[in-house]
Image (cartoon, coloured by chain):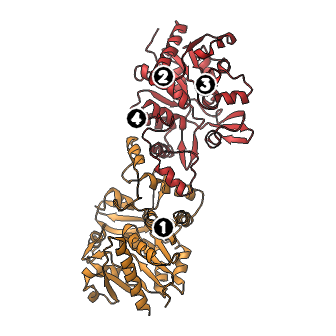
Chain colours: A red, B orange
Amino acid sequence: MNKTGPVVALSGGVGGAKLALGLYRILPPHTLTVVANTGDDFEHLGLSISPDIDTLLYTLSGQDNPELGWGRRAETWTFMAALDKLGGETWFRLGDGDLATHVERTRRLAAGEPLSVVTEEFCRRFGIAAKLLPMSDQNVRTRLETDRGRLDFQDYFVRLRCEPAVRRLEFAGSEAARPHPDFIAALADPDLRAVVVCPSNPFISIDPILAITGVRAALQACRAPVVAVSPIIGGKAVKGPTAKMMEELGLPVGAAAVARHYSDFLDLYVADEADRGAEARLDLPVVFASTLMVTIEDREALARAVLDAADRIRA
Amino acid sequence: MNKTGPVVALSGGVGGAKLALGLYRILPPHTLTVVANTGDDFEHLGLSISPDIDTLLYTLSGQDNPELGWGRRAETWTFMAALDKLGGETWFRLGDGDLATHVERTRRLAAGEPLSVVTEEFCRRFGIAAKLLPMSDQNVRTRLETDRGRLDFQDYFVRLRCEPAVRRLEFAGSEAARPHPDFIAALADPDLRAVVVCPSNPFISIDPILAITGVRAALQACRAPVVAVSPIIGGKAVKGPTAKMMEELGLPVGAAAVARHYSDFLDLYVADEADRGAEARLDLPVVFASTLMVTIEDREALARAVLDAADRIRA
C-alpha cells in the first residue's frame, strides 16, 4: 500500500485547520489537498472575504494568531479603530494585515480570476507546499432559518454570536455550483491514500461541501478510505456551536450522531477516547484517539493516528 | 466691513492645507469653506482615493502626520507589508488607518452617496468646524502629456515621482462636471469676506478647479477680494514640482508668473518677502509676507496677513 499517496482533507475554519496542519506537517510536500468550505464567504465593506480559506492559508503558512485563535500573527488593528471613528461597520473584525488578503483577493476576482487561481497564487506567495482548493469556483452561500428569521451566515455566526436557534440550513447556489475539478479528480485518483473529513462543524463547514452536486457521489465512489474525525469530545464541541446546533436540529448530541450524519460515504470514524462506547451505536469501524489538539504535537499525532487507521482499513 | 464674514479657500493637498489650517484656526467656527481639488482622485486596489480631500481632512482635524508630511498621525503599515508579500501593488503607500477612509468612502459612493455628502459626514465624525467641499461631485481626472507619453495623475506624481517633462495638462470631465452648488453659492454670498487661493501648485491643484465650467466666471463676478498666495519662494517651489513644471511649460519661473496665471480673476497677490520686486512686473496690488509655513504659528500668521490684506483692499 502506497503510504506516500495523496491525501484529501475536507475542512472548515479553525478546528479543521488544526488537523489539516497536522496532516500537512507529517506528509511529504505536495501530497495534501485541502478542500475548503466557502459557504461562509461573503461581501463586506466592498471586499470579498473567504474566512475558511484564510484560516487555512494563515494556519498552513504558520501565520495564524495563537492568542486570538483566528486571524493573523503580529496583527495590528489601526484600520478598525479608524473605521469605527468614521462610523463604519465594525462587527466583523478585520486586522490590518488580514485586510491585504481581502483587498488583493477582491481585486483579482474583479479582474476575472477564479477563486481557486487566487488561492493558488496566495499559497505560492506564502510558500505552502499543499494544494488548497475552494470547494467550488462558483458562489455557494450558507443561510440559516432560525427563531429570529432567515439569516446570512456571518450575521448568524459573528454578529449574533450563534445565539439564534437554528431550524434549517440552506446552501444557496450549491445546485448550480460545480465542485472544483481538481477536487473530483483527486477523489478518483487510484493512488489516493485517504480522504479525511476534518473535525469541523458538520452542518456549517462540511455540509456545504457535500451539498455541491456530484460531491457525495464522488465520495461514495471513492476507492480510498473516507475517514471522519469527530468534532465532539465527551458530548461537547471543542469550539463553536456544533453541540448547540445538534440539539436545535433534533439530533442526539454526541460523537455517534456525527458519524451517522456522514454514513452514506464514511468508511471509518475516529472518535475521542472520552467517547468509547460510541461504536456500539454505529455500523462502521471506529477507532479512538486523543482528538483534542492543543499543541502542534497533538495535531501531528492525531494526523498520524487518522492515516494509520485509514491504512489499516485499506490493507 | 464684516470681519466675521465667510471665507472661501481653494486648495490642493499638503501646501494648500497648511494655509487652510491657518485660516481655520484664526476664523470663528463654521466660517471657512475649503474647496478641494479632486483632479488627483483615482481608483486603486478597488478603492476610491481622494488624496487632497484626505490631506485636508487629516490636517484640519489635527490627525496629519508631521514626520511624513502626508498621511495620518500614529499610522501603522501592516497592510502594505502584507500586500507586498501577496504580490499586490505597493507603489501608492496606504497606511492602515488611512485605508479606513478609502474603504468607507468607496462603500458610501457605491451606495450612491455623492462625494460631498461622504466628505461632510467625515468632517462631522472628525469634528471639523469648517465646510470641506470637493470642487465637484462629478469625476474630473487630471492627465498629463509628457515626454514619456500621456499619464494618469498618480502615475506621474507618485509612481514616476514627477520625473517626466510635462507638455500639457488635461482635466478630463471638467466640461461636463458642475461645480458644487455650495461653492458657487459661497462665491455669490454678499457677506463673503475673501476668496483665498492657497499656495498650491497652480497647474495640478488649482487649475482643475478653475477648469470646471462656471468657476472662472463666478470668481470674476465675485464681489469679495480674490487673493492668491504665491507657492514660489525666491524662485523655488517649497515642495513638489511647481517650479519644474513652470520651466517645462515655458513660463518664467517665479512668483510673478503665478499671479499672471490667475490674472483674469485675481484682485490681490501675496508674495514672499524674498520676492520683493515681483510687483514691478504685475498690474495688481501685491503684498509681501513670510509665506514659508513651518510651525503652526507660521500658518496662523500668514492666514492673518492674507485676510488683513484682503480687508484693506476691500475697504
Badge number at residue A126: 4
Q: Is residue B152 visible?
A: no
Between A313 and B274, which is closer to the camera in this rendering? B274
Label 1 – label 4 distance at C-alpha: 42 Å
Q: Residue at x 72, y 28 (%)?
A: A247
Label 1 crowd (10 A; few <14 / some 14-19 / many >=20): some
Q: Determine whether, in the image, residue B263 is placed left or right of residue B185.
A: left
Three-letter code, disc 3? Val
- Whether residue A118 can be seen here: yes
Mark 2 highlights which residue?
A299
Please tell me which of labels 4 and 2 falls first in the chain: 4
Q: CA distance from mark 2 to mark 1?
A: 59 Å
Q: Return the mark for residue B173.
A: 1
Q: Are marks 4 and 3 on the same chain?
A: yes
Please tell me whether mark 3 or mark 1 is closer to you in this view.
Answer: 3
Q: Nearer the viewer, mark 2 or mark 1?
A: 2
Residue placed at 31% from the left, 87% from the top?
B282
Q: Which mark is residue A215?
A: 3
